Amino acid sequence: MSKETAALHDLIDRFKGRKVAVWGDFILDEYIYGCTQRISREAPVLILSYRSREYLLGGAGNALQNLKALGATPIPVGVIGRDEAGDALLALLQEHGIRDTKLFRDAACATPIKTRILAGEDNTRKQQILRIDREAYVPDDARLKAKLAAALGRLAPSCDALIVSDYSYRSVRPDVFKSALPSFRKTDVPVCLDSRFRLLAFSGVTIATPNEPEVEAALGREVGDSPASVRRAGQDLLSRLRSRALLITRGSKGMALFEKGKPVLSLPVHGTTDIVDVTGAGDTVISVFGLALASGASFRQAARLANVAGGLVVMKKGTATVTPDELRGAIDR
């Protein structure tokens, strides 16, 4: 075993028990399964014969699942509705053994739900044929923002990392972020950002992990395929974010890590490019990266672990997770 591989194994061993706060938008993922056997006479559409339904943690909840699977102690921070979807989400957290929560329930909110309908013949793998999003936004309420800020302030001295998982449903507020950030900096806790549409609203994070479309949206221009154009885009965004590092995920082209004053680290896709499902892969990447930093990793070590984890999770169906043993085995291979 090489010295580098041994160091990565040591980091994975240190994952267990690390306390990681996840502040973000918690979504209930609903999956409806059925079989299709004929076309409707009423319209040229499939008739779905209902078979079953299941609920899973979505949005920031997927980061919780990833952290839990890796042996960490995740703490959710956010706002959900006082509704049936909120009840189901809390029940899922209990099932996963996540009991220390800073989730505030509010009657003025609705818990977002993403319903995926999967269909196929009996004894075959079901394929997604439709997705229905019941979107809901947290109101700009001073009372709720004060609760979030207080919860984050209490967590700053005791947690090992903070992951900000912003799906733009407004559990994450730029003004709350700005008031909470100094507490995490004071205790030298890494703050990791995954934001769909508002990267530049959270400048000052330790690291962000956007994909290429998110980089293009933030910069207002195309990234391009050449190494020089990717380098320019990464360095520009790193400067605008005022971050110590930036990890751009590039799909089949791998990842690119940017650090101030250091050359770009380009990481090819780990494993095969014959991908099964990219759903939730970004949550896995930021979870592993944040947990690695919480365990004492350098940015380059954290990027290598996140790249391996991302390569593993896209070979699984749905919002999947990876285990420490899977990570160790993939690193050895």
Image: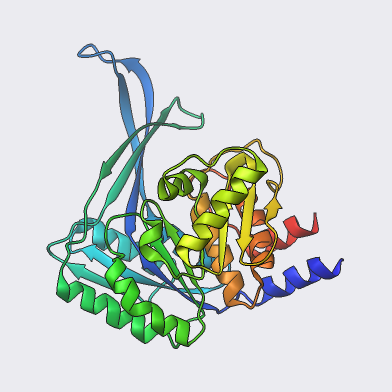
Please, is residue 83 above or below residue 280 in the view? below
Q: Quadrant of residue 157?
A: bottom left
Q: Which residue is at the far right?
A: 1
Please, is residue 258 above or below residue 125 in the view? below
Which residue sits at x=17%, y=60%? Answer: 109
Q: Position of residue 227 (x, y in %)?
A: 66, 44
The one of 15 and 42 positioned closer to us in this rendering: 15
The one of 215 and 164 positioned closer to us in this rendering: 215
Q: Quadrant of the N terminus?
A: bottom right
Q: Position of residue 194 (x, y in %)?
A: 45, 59
In the rendered structure, the answer to whether residue 56 lies left or right of residue 223 reads left
Which residue sits at x=63%, y=53%? Answer: 256
Residue 197 visible (yes or no)? yes
The one of 313 and 127 positioned closer to us in this rendering: 313
Q: Which residue is at the far left?
A: 108
Please, is residue 328 above or below residue 276 in the view? below
Residue 315 visible (yes or no)? no
In the rendered structure, the answer to whether residue 112 lies left or right of residue 298 reads left
In the rendered structure, the answer to whether residue 109 lies left or right of residue 76 reads left
Q: Quadrant of the C terminus?
A: bottom right
In the rendered structure, the answer to whether residue 76 lies left or right of residue 327 reads left
Q: Quadrant of residue 168?
A: bottom left
Q: Position of residue 146 (x, y in %)?
A: 22, 78
Q: Position of residue 186 (x, y in %)?
A: 46, 87
In this picture the colour scheme is: rainbow
Q: Quadrant of residue 97?
A: bottom left
The one of 193 and 314 positioned closer to us in this rendering: 193
| Count of residue discs | 0
